[in-house]
């Protein structure tokens, strides 16, 4: 009779009998280091030396056809059993087919490939390896059959088309390769596919065919980059008029495209290389009139460089200052005039720029220019040293006066025409104060200090997106001297009214 603790599910053993008993850890009594230390490298070396040789099955030497047949039967059974277990593993199919190939049994190898394709015909790697086996063993027609079926079933896999075409071209079948390219182009591949077709035709000096393909290419991919490639192709062929015609057609179609700037720059540079500077200038001007200013920065820089190289000063002024495209585009020309010592022209440019924008940076830049324009009158070279130094001193005083006039004009604008731009006005005064400090003994910081505002820390209510109150936030406000006077007058006026009302009420 079994024990009352016996469990039928455990074969009538007790749970104590089935517990895994771990050996008790050995306690180390002596923890002092051993006199001879063994390095990890030594342990690994001894482990390698004591490692037993790998047990490999003996090599079988087949001596007659019966043994060969048995070997093949056994291997095929192994492969078939493996395929039944992992049917979706393409690596097994490939090994099986290649083993049949190694046995020179190509019909069986094809059978394996075909069975693999039935399992997963969308796997283009199977098609590639299948066709490569046929090509390697010089079964050309079989390879053609494989490639043809592959591109029919998987027309969007570019690698299949490239391999198919390459095989035909290596065989010298140019007409066949061209037919394959045509089949491919009906599927409208990416740009690289079209360019490969064009390069193919040019390899055989078929320039006219290449031109016709370019025409279809730009229709399939009507992008700026494709039209530029087409034009450069014509230029490379020495066809200047054709290249110009390509650019003109591209402008008609893509003048409003997001990448139009790139097209106009390429067109203008093409005319420049052809020594047609007037044509290039017209292209630049047309482009500046049609492209939004946010997308024409590179075009503008190229045009400035072009005019500096080929235009006169009037041409530059007409091209740059005359364009109302960029808010600060005159400043590049301003730097040019300063470098030429044309200070009156520079002043005229600043005034013209201020007619269009009263931006803080323009005012500061103008004032700094006036404060540093000391080379306007170099004086008489025959002056004595003392006279020359006095002349420089007087000239510096004139520069300072002109800079102050610019600052005064700017402050007056912000006070009367833009009183809400308090922060800009305060920043302008800070710049003026720093400039007066930099003038040394000629500077007068008291002129600016009397105009500086007081900084007031205030709080204002904020609102969330749904219009509800979201608490308060702190901000800096500026109180300028004239505002302080107005505030004081209002306080005095309110006090006077209160006092007058109080006297009247007392009399009553």
Image (cartoon, grey):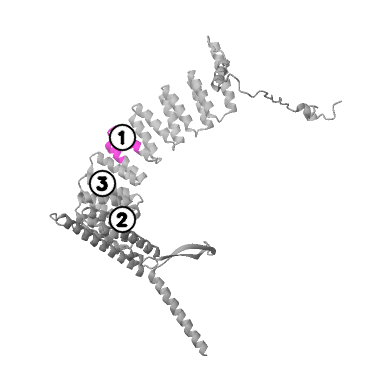
> Which numbered dot is residue 360?
none
Say which residue appears at 49% left-offset and 86% top-offset.
503
Q: CA distance from mark 1 to mark 2?
A: 38 Å
Residue 441 location (% of width, % of height): 28, 60
Indicate which label's residue lies in the foreground, 1 or 3: 3
Q: Quadrant of the N terminus?
A: top right
Q: Which residues are magenta?
A: 195-212
Q: Residues within 10 Å of mark 2 (few under 14, many from 20)?
A: few
The residue nearer to you, when weighing 359 against 374, is: 374
Circle 2 — which element?
helix
Residue 432 lies left or right of residue 134; in this view the side is left
Residue 330 lies left or right of residue 161; in this view the side is left
Res 408 quadrant in image: bottom left
> Which numbered dot is residue 290?
2
Q: Is residue 51 magenta?
A: no
Residue 324 location (% of width, % of height): 29, 59
Q: Residues within 10 Å of mark 1 (few under 14, many from 20)?
A: some
């Amino acid at each position: 009779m079994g024990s009352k603790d016996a469990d039928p599910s455990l074969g009538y053993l007790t749970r104590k009998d089935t517990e895994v008993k771990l050996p008790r850890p050995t306690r180390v009594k002596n923890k002092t280091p051993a006199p001879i230390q063994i390095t990890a490298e030594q342990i690994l070396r001894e482990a390698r030396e004591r490692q037993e040789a790998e047990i490999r099955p003996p090599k079988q030497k087949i001596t007659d056809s019966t043994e060969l047949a048995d070997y093949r039967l056994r291997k095929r059974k192994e492969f078939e059993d493996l395929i039944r277990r992992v049917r979706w593993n393409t690596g097994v199919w490939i090994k099986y087919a290649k083993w049949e190939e190694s046995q020179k049994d190509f019909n069986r190898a094809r059978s394996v490939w075909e069975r693999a394709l039935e399992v997963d015909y969308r796997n283009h790697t199977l098609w590639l390896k299948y066709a490569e086996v046929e090509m390697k063993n010089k079964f050309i027609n079989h390879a053609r059959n494989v490639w043809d079926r592959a591109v029919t079933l998987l027309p969007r896999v570019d690698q299949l088309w490239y391999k198919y075409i390459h095989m035909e071209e290596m065989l010298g079948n140019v007409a066949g390769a061209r037919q394959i390219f045509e089949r491919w182009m009906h599927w409208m591949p990416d740009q690289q596919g079209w360019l490969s077709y064009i390069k193919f035709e040019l390899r055989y000096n078929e320039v006219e065919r290449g031109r016709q393909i370019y025409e279809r290419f730009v229709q399939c991919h009507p992008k700026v980059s494709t039209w530029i490639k087409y034009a450069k192709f014509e230029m490379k062929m020495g066809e200047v008029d054709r290249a110009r015609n390509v650019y003109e057609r591209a402008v008609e179609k893509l003048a409003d495209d997001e990448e139009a700037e790139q097209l106009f720059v390429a067109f203008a540079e093409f005319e420049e290389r052809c020594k047609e500077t007037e044509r290039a200038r017209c292209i630049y001007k047309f482009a500046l009139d049609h492209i939004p200013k946010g997308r024409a920065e590179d075009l503008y820089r190229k045009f400035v460089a072009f005019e500096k190289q080929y235009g006169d000063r009037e041409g530059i002024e007409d091209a740059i200052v005359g364009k109302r495209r960029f808010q600060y585009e005159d400043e590049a020309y301003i730097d040019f005039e300063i470098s030429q010592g044309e200070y009156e022209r520079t002043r005229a440019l600043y005034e013209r720029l201020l007619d269009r924008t009263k931006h803080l940076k323009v005012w500061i830049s103008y004032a700094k220019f006036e404060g540093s324009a000391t080379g306007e009158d170099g004086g008489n070279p025959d002056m004595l040293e003392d006279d020359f130094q006095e002349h420089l001193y007087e000239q510096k005083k004139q520069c300072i006066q002109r800079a102050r006039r610019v600052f005064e004009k700017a402050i007056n604008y912000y006070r009367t025409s833009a009183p809400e731009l308090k922060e800009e006005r305060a920043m302008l005064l800070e710049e003026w104060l720093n400039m007066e400090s930099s003038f040394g003994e000629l500077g007068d910081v008291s002129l600016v200090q009397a105009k500086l505002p007081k900084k007031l820390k205030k709080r204002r209510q904020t609102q969330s997106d749904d219009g509800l109150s979201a608490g308060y936030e702190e901000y800096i406000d500026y109180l300028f001297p004239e505002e302080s006077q107005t505030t004081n007058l209002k306080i005095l006026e309110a006090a006077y009214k209160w006092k007058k009302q109080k006297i009247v009420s007392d009399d009553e």
